[in-house]
Image (cartoon, helix red, strand yellow):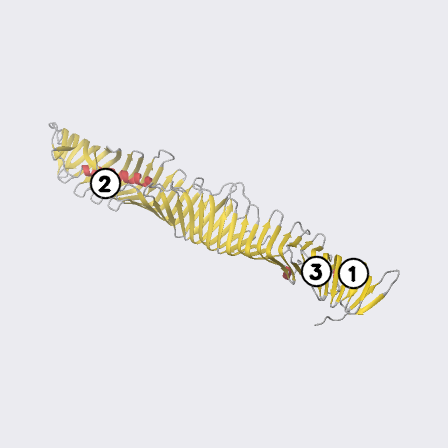
């Protein structure tokens, strides 16, 4: 997106303030008449003379010559000449030059300093100006040059047309009255064309004004506005500011900028655009093409910055910025994104014009199909389609049934990966129904907390690191690391590891198979080095110094496996070993393997040598049964020598 300051200067200043001034200066003083030849006889009824020459002498030097093929009359209005060819000297920008005016007719009043040229008027100067019009009027007393007709002009690579022109030399004021058009050819690239209803220029103010349907075009670059004001340096050498007003639209390189006003500033050294501001109520659309999103930005103001070559390098939406992105080109991927924030700053690659990054400030909300994100600040990097949110970051994902909050969240668009850091709080509704941490009950959603979180979309795996906690209703798991693999439906897997793993599971009697079953009064609390829940196997495996507690029954073993009910919502049994140690109050028991059934709070120990000890006795057998529900313990001896003893449990000392 570029504005060409030299386009405006060469288009109007060079033509108007330089060239028309030269014409005016040439005619300011009446020339001293000096006939070059004797007049010939005139026809009856007319006064004529042929081959007339008027010379202008200043300080003894000839400064101008007016030649006429014939004088056809003279009255109070002046002398009527035909076939006029006038040449005058002038000074422009410190350099001496010459101006030549050719016309079919001229009404010339030397005393009143008036000249009216008519009929194929052609003005040329040594600086390269050519001006053509059916008429041109000069009033020396008012220092005025004007024409009510069509005026065509050209100088070097600049040409144009206007209907009606007026130049006031004293104040350096130029007016192009109607249908203004200017064309500037360039050494490289397409020409620049300027059109407007009217135009004015002031040498004193060093300013140009275009009004009425202003259109500036260069190739596919188009600026439209109802008004355009151009500020020039005091020496008129360059444009340092241009302001487009009312119904402004700037279209270039797949971008369209709109607003009530566009204020552009130019570099004093390179004369190229430096920065610009559009607004209030500005908008900008950016076409993306294949595989790149189409974007539209609206804001109270839109600020543009350019590099040293005048190429767009930064776009900023200020106050209530809204950025809408939609897939563009033939590579459309479906969906879209809306970003709302106080300030949005986008950085571009100047050569290609491609978006590099976007920064969001002052509170940001990002809405996509089935996903919404909020934060205090954010940043988007186009290369990896990475969205980073910081301070009070939150992502609500309807498709994933997820609500993620953290101090910082990062979303990777290409891969779909998600990461979060510090104060991670993640609420997830499991895809699969049932399980010890699932179910259709709203209270059974998973509440995850940790310091760090990372989700890998390709494998549907989430990792919670450092002080990780999973809580679903009354159930929970704590560990340094919790890994959740969603996988295919019915193949969910949860792994807790890193030492110090703690889980608390409450059995729930659900489904037809559990009708009438007794619900446990106590949860199953477990400590271990590692815990693995596999939905496909309907088991939870604990490894490494496993301790399982339910009520006052505690088991310790190297490994334990919890077998779940058909729907996974309750613990059907827990098998611990090998070996296993059991505590209940003051009693201790050891065996090879233990099977605990939470439904009736019964633990059965088996092995070649099962030993039970309490403060009063020591019993040895092959099986041992604890019935916490009826407060009894059953010891069963060998089959060949069967004995049975029943002991009442003694309470532990306070």
Distance from disc 2 to disc 1, alpha carbons, whole Å, reads 117 Å
Task: Give the secondary structure at mark 2.
Answer: strand
Distance from disc 3 to disc 1, alpha carbons, whole Å, reads 15 Å
What's the mark number on residue 309?
A: none
Task: Compare marks 3 and 1 and give the one earlier in the sequence.
Answer: 3
**Residue 520 percent across, percent down from the top left:** 72, 65
Mark yes or no: residue 507 visible. no
**Residue 157 percent across, percent down from the top left:** 31, 34
Task: Determine whether label 2 and label 1 are within 8 Å by CB.
Answer: no
Mark yes or no: residue 320 visible. yes
Task: Give the secondary structure at mark 3.
Answer: strand
Q: Nearer the viewer, residue 388 or 104?
A: 388
Q: Where on the picture, by quarter, is residue 45?
A: top left
Can you say whether 412 is above or below 576 in the image? above
Q: How many marks?
A: 3
Can you say whether 318 is above or below 86 in the image? below
Can you say whether 381 is above or below 571 in the image? above
Task: Compare marks 3 and 2 and give the one earlier in the sequence.
Answer: 2
**Residue 56 percent across, percent down from the top left:** 14, 34
**Disc 2 vs disc 1: which is toward the camera?**
1
Q: Pointer 3: what residue?
A: 547
Q: Pointer 1: what residue?
A: 605
Q: Nearer the viewer, residue 482 or 189?
A: 482
Task: Give the secondary structure at mark 1.
Answer: strand
How packed mark 1 is, by other alpha carbons closer than 10 Å (few <14, some 14-19, many 20 or more), is many
Residue at 52 percent across and 46 percent down: it is: 385
Q: Is residue 289 left or right of residue 311?
A: right
How packed mark 3 is, by other alpha carbons closer than 10 Å (few <14, some 14-19, many 20 or more), is many
What's the mark number on residue 146?
A: 2
Viewport quadrant of the C terminus: bottom right
Distance from disc 3 to disc 2, alpha carbons, whole Å, reads 105 Å
């Amino acid at each position: 997106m570029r504005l060409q300051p030299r386009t405006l200067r060469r288009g109007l200043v060079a033509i108007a303030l330089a060239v028309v001034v030269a014409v005016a200066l040439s005619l300011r003083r009446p020339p001293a008449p000096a006939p070059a030849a004797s007049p010939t006889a005139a026809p009856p009824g007319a006064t004529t003379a042929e081959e007339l020459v008027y010379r202008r002498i200043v300080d003894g030097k000839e400064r101008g010559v007016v030649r006429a093929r014939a004088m056809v009359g003279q009255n109070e209005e002046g002398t009527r000449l035909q076939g006029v060819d006038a040449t005058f000297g002038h000074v422009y920008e410190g350099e001496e030059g010459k101006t030549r005016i050719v016309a079919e007719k001229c009404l010339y009043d030397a005393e009143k300093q008036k000249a009216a040229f008519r009929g194929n008027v052609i003005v040329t100067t040594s600086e390269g100006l050519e001006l053509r019009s059916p008429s041109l009027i000069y009033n020396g007393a008012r220092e005025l040059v004007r024409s009510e007709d069509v005026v065509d002009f050209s100088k070097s690579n600049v040409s144009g047309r206007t209907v009606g022109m007026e130049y006031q030399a004293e104040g350096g004021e130029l007016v192009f009255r109607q249908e203004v058009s200017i064309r500037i050819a360039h050494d490289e690239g397409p020409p620049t064309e300027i059109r407007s209803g009217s135009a004015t220029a002031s040498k004193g103010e060093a300013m140009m004004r275009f009004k009425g349907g202003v259109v500036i075009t260069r190739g596919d670059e188009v600026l439209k506005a109802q008004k355009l004001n151009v500020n020039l340096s005091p020496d008129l050498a360059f444009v340092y500011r241009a302001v487009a007003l009312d119904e402004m639209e700037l279209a270039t390189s797949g971008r369209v900028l709109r607003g009530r006003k566009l204020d552009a500033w130019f570099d004093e050294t390179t004369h190229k655009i430096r920065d610009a501001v559009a607004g209030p109520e500005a908008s900008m659309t950016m076409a993306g093409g294949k595989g790149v999103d189409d974007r539209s930005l609206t804001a109270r103001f839109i600020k543009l910055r350019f590099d040293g070559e005048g190429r767009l390098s930064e776009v900023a939406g200020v106050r209530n910025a809204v950025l809408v992105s939609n897939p563009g080109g033939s590579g459309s991927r479906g969906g879209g994104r809306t970003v709302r924030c106080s300030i949005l700053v986008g950085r571009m690659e100047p050569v290609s014009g491609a978006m590099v990054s976007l920064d969001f400030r002052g509170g940001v909300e990002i809405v996509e199909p089935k996903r919404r994100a909020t934060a205090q600040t954010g940043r988007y990097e186009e290369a990896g389609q990475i969205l980073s949110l910081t301070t009070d970051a939150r992502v609500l994902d309807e498709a994933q049934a997820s609500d993620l909050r953290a101090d910082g969240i990062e979303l990777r668009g290409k891969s779909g990966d998600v990461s979060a850091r510090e104060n991670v709080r993640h609420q997830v509704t499991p895809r699969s129904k049932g399980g010890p941490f699932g179910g259709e009950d709203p209270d059974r959603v998973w509440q995850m907390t940790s310091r760090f979180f990372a989700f890998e979309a390709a494998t549907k795996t989430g990792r919670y690191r450092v002080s990780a906690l999973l809580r679903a209703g009354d159930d929970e798991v704590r560990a340094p690391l919790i890994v959740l693999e969603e996988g295919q439906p019915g193949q969910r897997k949860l792994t807790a590891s890193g030492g110090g793993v703690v889980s608390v599971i409450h059995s729930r009697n659900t489904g037809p198979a559990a009708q009438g079953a007794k619900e446990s009064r106590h949860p199953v609390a477990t400590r271990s080095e590692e815990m693995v829940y596999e939905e496909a196997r309907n088991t939870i495996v604990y490894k490494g110094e496993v301790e399982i507690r339910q009520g006052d029954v505690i088991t310790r073993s190297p490994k334990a496996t919890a077998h779940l009910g058909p729907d996974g919502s309750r613990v059907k049994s827990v098998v611990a070993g090998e070996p296993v140690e059991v505590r209940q109050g003051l009693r201790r028991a050891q065996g090879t393997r233990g099977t605990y059934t939470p439904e009736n709070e019964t633990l059965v120990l088996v092995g070649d040598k099962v030993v039970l000890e309490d403060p009063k006795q020591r019993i040895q057998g092959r099986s041992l049964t604890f019935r916490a529900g009826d407060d009894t313990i059953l010891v069963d001896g060998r089959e060949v020598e069967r004995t049975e003893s029943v002991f009442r449990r003694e309470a532990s000392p306070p």
